[in-house]
Amino acid sequence: MAGITNGYCTLEEFKRSKDITSTDAKRDSVIERIIEGASRDFDTETGRTFYARTETRYYSIPDGRELSVDDDLLTITTLTNGDANTIASTEYNLLPRNISPKFSVKLKGSSSYYWDYDSSGNSEYVISILGTWGYSATTPSDVRQAVLMIAEMEYDSRFGTSGGAVTVTGAGVVITPQSWPAKAKMTARKYKRMV
């Protein structure tokens, strides 16, 4: 088995939920792919990730002292200005101040720093932030449950069963629901990133 990369529920949780007690490496591998796919679908639907990842992102010089970031920010390891100087954490605040994730970096009013151009006078994508990105370092329990429901629905659809109401047309055509369970949709709406 390849395992699950950044899945929001585990193989064991899924098997417990479906009351699967036997071990079948081939089936387990399929379940792991379903869980990973459901997790990535949840990311796409909400516009965010629910695991911490370390990466460097680049930004243009903003108007004023506040730099808005385009993803959920948990921590900054290194903030590098356009002039290649590192800005110490004592020189800025992450906002919003009392909640996480963060959406912007604001240079303190008392700081002598300002957002600066690179050596060629460019202002576009000259500021870099090496940090930890994502909504949270651990998956919220309601996201875990929503992804578990989505994965169960996907798993059941392989066998022609469905978790939602089935519609039969006047001509006798059976239409099975293709969307997520209602509770999973509500959870995704709750976490949807507003741009």
Image (tube, rainbow, N blue to C red):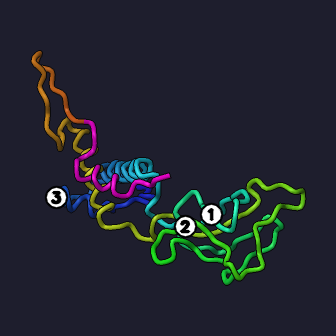
Residue pushed farthest right?
120
* Position of 8 relative to 38 (above/below): below
Residue at x 70%, y 71% (from the top left corner): 79
For the residues marked 1 and 2, what is the alpha-carbon distance in whole angstroms? 11 Å
Question: Vertical placement of 71 versus 178: above or below?
Answer: below
For the residue marked with disc 3, what is the amino acid? Asp
Q: Let me know if residue 109 is in the magenta part.
A: no
Q: Quadrant of residue 104?
A: bottom right
Query: Mark 3 falls on what kind of element?
Result: loop
Secondary structure under tag 1 reads strand
**Disc 2 residue type?**
Leu
Q: Residues within 10 Å of mark 3 (few under 14, many from 20)?
A: few
Q: CA distance from mark 3 to mark 1?
A: 39 Å
Q: Residues within 10 Å of mark 2 (few under 14, many from 20)?
A: many
Kindly identify which residue carries mark 2.
73
Q: Amino acid at mark 1?
A: Glu
Report the residue marked by disc 3.
19
Q: In this rendering, would 132 be left or right of 180?
A: right
The magenta stretch spans which residues? 178-195
Marks 2/3: CA–CA distance: 38 Å
Q: Residues within 10 Å of mark 1 (few under 14, many from 20)?
A: few
Residue indicated by mark 1:
55
